[in-house]
Amino acid sequence: MKATGTGTKTRSNGLNVTRPYTGYDTNSRGPLPGTVALRDLILFFNPGFTNLGTYAKRDARGKPGQPSVHQTGRATDIGYTLRKDMEPVIKWLVDNADELGVEMVADYWPQPWGRAWRCDRAAWKVYNRKTISGAPGGRWIHIEISPTIASDAAAMSAAIEKALT
């Protein structure tokens, strides 16, 4: 198996390696420790970034009746001012998605309607119609991580250490 540099790994037969996408699964009482660890690491290394929200009990924006993954404690939104500062962070998250348990990165900036990387397709999808509320031109990303690593700060810390080396 080899990494392709785009967050996609390929087997020797050329097929992409994917993982199931969880999405909303259950309510939490607050942000989960692994989510907090990843969010705090990103903010620590990028002092110009802001935490735009981790836990919120609400519907997904623009999707009435569909619970937000923020309710699970496994999602965080990170804001930025300069696009050039966020691009390497996005690349790092996707390139290390398996290790970090990243299931989705929604990027609200690109035209025509933003884009999202998901673990179940191991690829980016550029949206050609309004799909994620706030795109295009949104200066933040939305990150979702798997239930297992989100619940375990020690596992996330070990994954971060490995991803940084």
Image: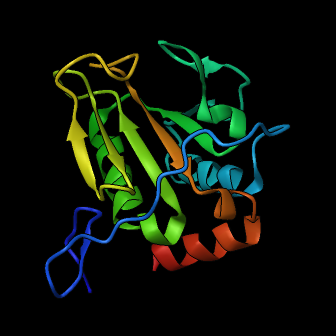
The colour scheme used here is rainbow
Q: Is residue 27 above or below residue 22?
A: above
- Rendering quarter of residue 111: top left
Q: Nearer the viewer, residue 48 or 146?
A: 146
Give the number of callouts.
0
Q: Is residue 129 above or below residue 34?
A: above
Q: Is residue 8 left or right of residue 160?
A: left
- Residue 148: x percent and y percent? 67, 64
Q: Quadrant of the N terminus?
A: bottom left
- Residue 35: x percent and y percent? 66, 51
Please tell me which residue is depicted at 35% across the width and 65% down the height of the picture.
18
Please tell me which residue is depicted at 46% across the width and 59% down the height of the picture.
20
- Residue 137: x percent and y percent? 28, 19
Q: Is residue 137 above or below residue 159?
A: above
Please tell me which residue is depicted at 47% across the width and 52% down the height of the picture.
21
- Residue 32: x percent and y percent? 75, 49
Q: Nearer the viewer, residue 35 or 104?
A: 104
Q: Quadrant of the C terminus?
A: bottom left
Q: Is residue 139 left or right of residue 12?
A: right
